[in-house]
Amino acid sequence: MARFLRAILFGLVGAALIHLVVVLLVPYYSDRNSWSRVAAYGDDWQFHRVTRDGAPGMVPLAFDPLFQASVCRFDITDLPAHITGLGTTPYWSISVYNRQGENLYSINDRTAIADQLDLVVATPLQMIELNKTKPESAENSVLIEADMDEGFVVVRSFIPDASWQSQVTAFLDSAACTPLL
């Protein structure tokens, strides 16, 4: 019986220590989410190239060498976000994420209008206004309604071989993330 009680006591002490360590590590890991990774790249409303090394002070990313990516943070509290890009690549995709890192919408060159990167991310109220009077700059845009204030987009492009490198780089460099006026 004494052995059984000792085993129970050690189990309870061990469980208490594990729970204490987990609680103490929460602040450390809560700052290491996708939003803070994207914020470390730079200012809002600008595309930043995602590199294998990641942002300064961050853990390196497991990154597919056949893809290049850019990321842009935005705040659509006042105005919708207009994301555009020019050029031709073998394949591109864009994903819209909220602040928590949840993927809200994805589209690629096969499903985009005329294979062009042109989309608008707006709140539900902004979408009502857009449907009433759509600006000329967003006439051919894919409209995405998102119930959020802040988010980010990631544009990825496929590089099948070295001959495509300059075109993919030019495409990602042409990507713009601006408030829709």
Image (tube, helix red, strand yellow):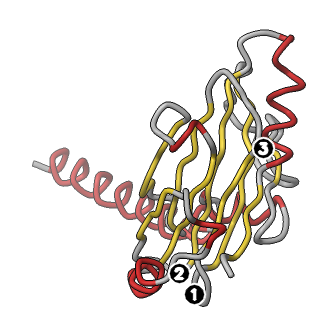
Image coords of residue 134 (percent x, y): 52, 76
Of badges 3 and 1, nearer the viewer stands 1
Circle 1 is placed at which residue position?
Answer: 77
Image coords of residue 30 (percent x, y): 57, 67
Which of the two residues, 11 or 146, is positioned nearer the viewer here?
Answer: 146
The picture quadrant where one finds residue 104 is bottom left
Circle 2 is placed at which residue position?
Answer: 149
Is label 1 in contact with label 2 (beta carbons under 8 Å)?
yes
Residue positioned 43% across, 78% down in the render? 127
Residue positioned 68% across, 65% down in the render? 36
Badge 3 marks a residue whose secondary structure is strand
Could you tell me the amino acid type at mark 3? Val
Is 178 situated above or below 48? below
Could you tell me the amino acid type at mark 1? Thr
- Tell me the distance, in whole angstroms, between the alpha carbons under discs 3 and 2: 23 Å
Badge 2 marks a residue whose secondary structure is loop
- Tell me the distance, in whole angstroms, between the alpha carbons under discs 1 and 2: 5 Å
